[in-house]
Image (cartoon, rainbow, N blue to C red):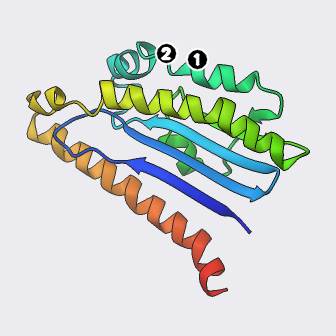
């Protein structure tokens, strides 16, 4: 059975900054998938300045690259096209597959946890700032953020229920 732990933060529509997510999906004592990202709230093709501000200038890509150097960690590709479409270009979606449970705990403690804390600090310092809420945004931009967030949350709830109901009532 799957053991899923998710930490997600959703900002309101007074800021366009990304939302933070960290998810651990454990399928056995020696195997798990992690997702660590600042989920974009803008279309990145239409808003390249958003990529620069929240992903390039914050060096988020370096966390993914350093985690991929750890033995036992490999890239993971979600089978869900919807899930993949919501990630940033700097997302860490990784599979940890090791021989011993202690090694998994060591990787989580020594590598994944520090990376997750660093990404959370980037989010706290660059995204969850009161100054951003004072930035003037047009009503159309606010509505678009609300629509995007609502759609993303709804799909996440549906997917969670699809996974969890069979376990809860199965």
**Image point 33% across, 16% down: which residue?**
49
Tell me if 65 is positioned left or right of 149 in this view. Answer: right
Near mark 2 (Cα within 10 A), the count class, few <14, some 14-19 or many ≥20, is some
* Residue 167 locus on image (x, y percent): 65, 78
In this picture, is 56 found above or below 122? above
In the rendered image, which quarter is residue 42 located in?
top left
Q: CA distance from mark 1 to mark 2?
A: 6 Å
In the rendered image, which quarter is residue 127 located in?
top left
Q: Is residue 44 visible?
A: no
Say whether marks 1 and 2 touch (CB < 8 Å). Answer: yes
* Residue 30 locus on image (x, y percent): 82, 50
Tell me if 168 is positioned left or right of 136 in this view. Answer: right
* Residue 7 locus on image (x, y percent): 47, 50
Q: Which residue is mark 1?
A: 62
| Circle count | 2
Q: Which residue is mark 2?
A: 59
- Secondary structure category for the residue under label 2: loop
Q: Which mark is residue 148?
A: none
**Image point 68% across, 26% down: which residue?**
67
In this picture, is 161 found above or below 59? below
**Image point 39% across, 35% down: which residue?**
40
* Residue 144 locus on image (x, y percent): 23, 44
In this picture, is 47 found above or below 27? above
Point out the image quarter for the C terminus.
Answer: bottom right
């Amino acid at each position: 059975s799957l053991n899923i732990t998710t930490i997600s933060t959703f900002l309101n529509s007074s800021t366009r900054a990304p939302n933070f997510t960290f998810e651990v999906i454990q399928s056995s004592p020696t195997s798990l998938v992690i997702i660590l990202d600042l989920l974009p709230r803008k279309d990145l093709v239409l808003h390249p300045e958003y990529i620069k501000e929240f992903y390039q200038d914050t060096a988020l890509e370096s966390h993914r690259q350093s985690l991929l150097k750890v033995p036992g960690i490999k890239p993971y590709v979600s089978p869900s096209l919807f899930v993949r479409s919501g990630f940033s270009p700097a997302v860490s979606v990784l599979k940890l597959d090791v021989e011993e449970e202690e090694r998994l705990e060591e990787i989580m403690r020594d590598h994944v946890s520090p990376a997750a804390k660093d990404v959370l600090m980037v989010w706290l310092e660059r995204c969850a700032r009161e100054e951003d809420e004072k930035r003037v945004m047009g009503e159309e931009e606010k509505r678009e953020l609300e629509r995007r967030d609502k759609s993303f949350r709804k799909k996440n709830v549906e997917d969670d229920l699809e996974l969890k109901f069979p376990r809860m009532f199965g």
